[in-house]
Structures are given as C-alpha cells and as structure tokens.
Image (cartoon, rainbow, N blue to C red):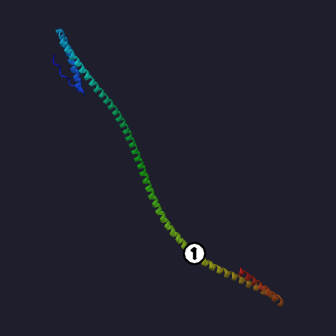
Amino acid sequence: MPPQPPPKQGFSQGSSLRSIAEGSNSAASMAVNNQDAAGHQAAYVAKNTLAQSAAAASATAQAALAGKQILLQGLEQQYRDAQQALMSERQQLMQAQRAADSTQRAAAEANQHVNVLQNTLNAAQAAAQTVTQAANEAAGELAAQQAMVGSAMDRLEQIGKQLAAVRIDFEATRTAAQQAQAAAQAAAANAAAAAASSRCRPGQDGDASATTAETPRRKQQRRWRR
C-alpha cells in the first residue's frame, strides 16, 4: 500500500474536517486502485481488506461532511444574525440621525427665539430709558407748574384782599354819594318849596310850605332805608 499524501491546509474554520474528508477520499481512491491491482493477482483477502479500508474511509468522509455541514449551518445562522444586527444598528443609526437633526433644528429655533427675545429686551430697555427720561422731564415741568400755580394763588389772594378792601371803600363811597345826592335833592326841593310859599298867603302858605317841605324829606328817608 503506497503512503497517503499529507492533508491540505484550509483557510476557514473547521479546515481539519476538510483535511479528513480529502484524506479519506484519497485513501478510498487508492484502495480501489490497489483493489484492481490485487484483482490481477487474484488475492481475495487483499481485495476484502481494501474494501474494508475504503468503507472506513467513506464513513470517515461522511462524518467529516456532517461536521462540516453543522459548522456551515452554524456560520450561516451567525451570518443571518449578523445581518439582522446590522439592519437593527442601521435603523438605530437612522433614528439617531433623525433625532440629531431634530435636536439641531430645535437648537436653531431656540437660538432664534433667544435672539428675538434679546432684541425685544433691548427695545424694551431703550423704551424704558426714554419713558424714564420723559417722566423726569414731566416731573420737572410739574414742579415748575406747581410753583407757578402757587405764585398765581398768592397773587390771587393778594388781589382778592385788595378787591375786598376796594369793594368796602366803593360801598362806602357809593353810600356817601347817594346820601350827598339825596341831600342835594332835598335841599333843592326845600328851595323850591320856599320859593313857592313866598307867593302864597301867609296862613295858608305856611301850612302848604310845611306840607311841601316834608315831602322831600320823606322821599330821602325812604331812599336811605333802601
């Protein structure tokens, strides 16, 4: 029996099973070849031995194939699992990307709101300064106006006192003028009555003069009473 060739080195997981299967194939082929050679020699024992060797090599190759199939199925399942994991990770990556984009948009909108609020605050501060300045100016004008009102009230009070004094003097002057006018009228009436009585008889003229002279006096008394 010729020596078997060394098993070939594989590059994948389970390469020993491949080497076993290939070695068994070589052994079975050599057994068949040797069996043909032994047939020429008509050696039954040799053929039977070679047949057993070929059967054992075939069983070994089948066992290696079964192990390799199990390994292949396991690797295929791991590959499918890895694909599922990759798909899941990609989905999570897409979700994370969408979340990041949404967060960036929200941050940009928040910054815009901050800018708007800052501008509004600046405008409000400027308006507050303007209003404060206007209020200070209005307070100054109010104080000045209050001083002017106080001066006007003092002047009004002084003029009022002067007016009251003038009114008193006016009333006294008017009363004196009325009295003087009444006295003048009474004197004129008395003079007229005296002139008229001088043309009448002495007895009658005296009574008439007395009556005529009393009439203006009564009128003057009524005027004073008024």
Dot 1 crowding, Cα within 10 Å, few <14, some 14–19, many 20+: few
Look at the picture and state if 209 lies above or below 160: below
On the image, which quarter does residue 77 sit in? top left
**Furthest residue to the bottom?**
202
Which residue: 44% across, 55% down?
Answer: 124
Left or right? Give the position of 105 relative to 143. left
Look at the picture and state if 41 lies above or below 170: above
* Residue under label 1: 159
* Residue 91 image offset from top left, x and y in percent: 37, 35
Which residue: 24% across, 20% down?
Answer: 59
Q: Secondary structure at mark 1?
A: helix
| Amino acid type shown at disc 1 | Ile
On the image, which quarter does residue 82 sit in? top left
* Residue 122 image offset from top left, x and y in percent: 42, 54
Q: Which of 86 and 1 lies nearest the eye of the viewer?
A: 1
Which residue: 77% across, 84% down?
Answer: 215
Look at the picture and state if 32 lies above or below 129: above
Quarter of the image where the N terminus is located:
top left
Look at the picture and state if 111 lies above or below 226: above
**Furthest residue to the left?**
2
Quarter of the image where the C terminus is located:
bottom right
Q: Which of 203 and 5 lies nearest the eye of the viewer?
A: 5
Left or right? Give the position of 99 relative to 186. left
Left or right? Give the position of 224 relative to 115. right
Q: Which of 197 and 44 lies nearest the eye of the viewer?
A: 44
* Residue 176 image offset from top left, x and y in percent: 67, 82
Q: Which of 209 and 49 lies nearest the eye of the viewer?
A: 49
* Residue 42 image offset from top left, x and y in percent: 17, 9
Q: How many marks?
A: 1
On the image, which quarter does residue 192 sit in? bottom right
